[in-house]
Image (tube, grey):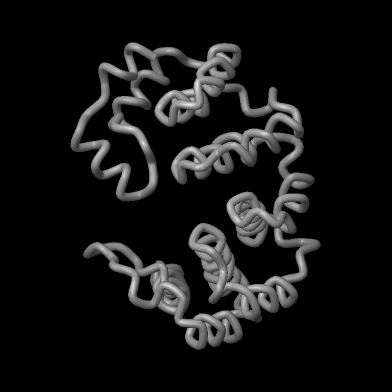
Amino acid sequence: MAELAGLEDAQARQVNERHGDDHGVNLGKLRAVAKRLKTQHELACRLWETDDTAARLLALLICRPKAFSRAELDAMIRETRAPKVHDWLVNYVVKKNAHAEELRVAWFADPDPVVASAGWALTTERVAKKPEGLDLPALLDVIEAEMRDAPDRLQWAMNHCLAQIGIDHPQHRARALDIGERLEVLKDYPTSPGCTSPFAPTWINEIVRRQQAG
């Protein structure tokens, strides 16, 4: 904890807080600490218990993802509010855990929009890598009905799922584009030069164009 406190940087905190992350540690430096520590699951659990955002990010880099029980992961997602911790927990830990599919189904229908966004993120992963068994038209129905008025984090996750369906499943592309055009979610989102807009129709068309060109 003392080492993490020593890495605190006012400028990094300013940038992180704009994204809702209450810590001031440069992520490159945090990864360097994790690389040195290697996997230490017990230490990771102790770091997680501090409730400190930088410590929790470090915990997610040095834990053993498969060692967590379903109940532990469910508790962790519910007490996670910093977006970066939530993102890393889903991508670096839950996706590698044997309970990922059960949690996807449970979280998808959760009344807490932040927990539900984790269910949508896991669903997007399946849309891309293992779509067998998913009802894609039904997913598009939910997105069409609920995405425009969904809270930010849930809206972002639904939008990613919409784009992924449009990119990976040509038979549903026209409908995905149409939903995106009509709902106009993230249409005016500020996008840095060289980055793809998160507006689903732009995102879908750009990635498909790159795939066809490649």
In the image, residue 53 sits, relative to residue 192, either above or below, namely above
Residue 89 is drawn in which quadrant? Answer: top right
Is 68 or 169 nearer to us in this picture? 68
Q: Is residue 110 left or right of residue 149?
A: right
Q: Is residue 143 left or right of residue 133?
A: left
Residue 67 in the image, given as x and y percentages of width and height: 69, 23
What residue occupies the far left of the structure in this picture?
Answer: 11
In the image, residue 117 sits, relative to residue 148, either above or below, namely above
Residue 165 in the image, given as x and y percentages of width and height: 60, 70
Is 188 or 65 nearer to us in this picture? 188
For image coordinates 65% across by 81% down, the residue present is 171
For image coordinates 79% across by 45% down, the residue present is 102
Number of numbered discs: 0
For image coordinates 60% across by 34% down, the residue present is 93
Can residue 212 be seen here? The reply is no
Q: In the rendered view of the protein, which quadrant contains the C terminus?
A: bottom left
For image coordinates 29% across by 32% down, the residue present is 24
Is 109 or 104 nearer to us in this picture? 109
Is 129 or 119 nearer to us in this picture? 119
